[in-house]
Image (cartoon, helix red, strand yellow):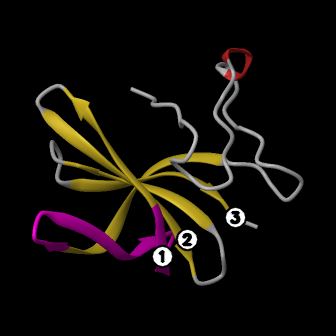
């Protein structure tokens, strides 16, 4: 099920308006567009003291180092949880990663690459 972003969840993404619901992208301003990806990715993460911290991920045979996590939130999917992470790489590209407790796997949800 596709979840919509609300203000503050992913830097530089405006919350979708009802008329935007049918579109696959949301405007972010003059420098780019958010692109929906929805692909599984390999993520190196630290699981410590009840926290999850993504450190790097591999997408299309390239490794991306996470410079900082700009937002975290979670949603329920039945009895399971989805953990969302808005991350910024060292070259200031923005990505949204999701960790599913149902599959114990990661998904690259969307990106806003400059």
Tell me which segment is drawn in magenta.
Answer: 47-70
Q: Residue at x 68, y 53 (%)?
A: 12
Q: Mark number for residue 88?
A: 2
CB atoms at circles 1 and 3 under 8 Å apart? Answer: no
Q: Residue at x 58, y 40 (%)?
A: 7
Residue ranking furthest to the front = 8
Q: Residues under labels 1 and 3: Cα distance?
A: 15 Å
Q: Mark number for residue 68?
A: 1
CB atoms at circles 1 and 2 under 8 Å apart? Answer: yes
Where is mark 3, residue-wise? Answer: 113
Residue 22 location (% of width, % of height): 67, 19
Q: Residue at x 56, y 77 (%)?
A: 89
Specify which label sits upstream in the sequence, 1 or 3.
1
Judging depth in this view, the residue of 19 and 103 nearest the camera is 19
Specify which label sits upstream in the sequence, 2 or 3.
2
Residue 103 is left or right of residue 71, and the answer is left
Magenta highlight: main SS: strand
Residue 87 location (% of width, % of height): 49, 66
Which secondary structure, mark 1? strand
User: Which quadrant would residue 25 be assigned to in this image?
Assistant: top right
Residue 101 location (% of width, % of height): 16, 47
How dense is the environment of label 1, judged by Cα within 10 Å: few (below 14), some, or many (20 and up)?
some
Q: Residues under labels 2 and 3: Cα distance?
A: 10 Å
Specify which label sits upstream in the sequence, 1 or 2.
1
User: Which quadrant would residue 26 be assigned to in this image?
Assistant: top right
Looking at the image, is mark 2 or mark 3 nearer the viewer?
2
Magenta run includes residue 18: no
Residue 73 is left or right of residue 51, and the answer is right
Which secondary structure, mark 2? strand
How dense is the environment of label 2, judged by Cα within 10 Å: few (below 14), some, or many (20 and up)?
many
Residue 79 is left or right of residue 2, and the answer is left
Q: Residues under labels 1 and 2: Cα distance?
A: 5 Å
């Amino acid at each position: 099920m596709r979840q919509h972003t609300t203000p503050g969840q992913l830097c530089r993404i405006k919350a979708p308006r009802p008329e935007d619901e049918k579109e696959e992208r949301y405007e972010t301003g003059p420098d780019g567009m958010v692109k929906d990806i929805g692909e599984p990715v390999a993520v190196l993460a630290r699981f410590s003291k009840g926290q999850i911290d993504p450190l790097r991920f591999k997408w299309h045979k390239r490794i991306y180092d996470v410079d900082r996590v700009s937002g975290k939130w979670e949603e329920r999917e039945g009895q399971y949880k989805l953990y969302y992470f808005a991350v910024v790489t060292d070259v200031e590209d923005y990505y949204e990663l999701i960790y599913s407790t149902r599959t114990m796997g990661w998904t690259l949800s969307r990106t806003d690459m400059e």
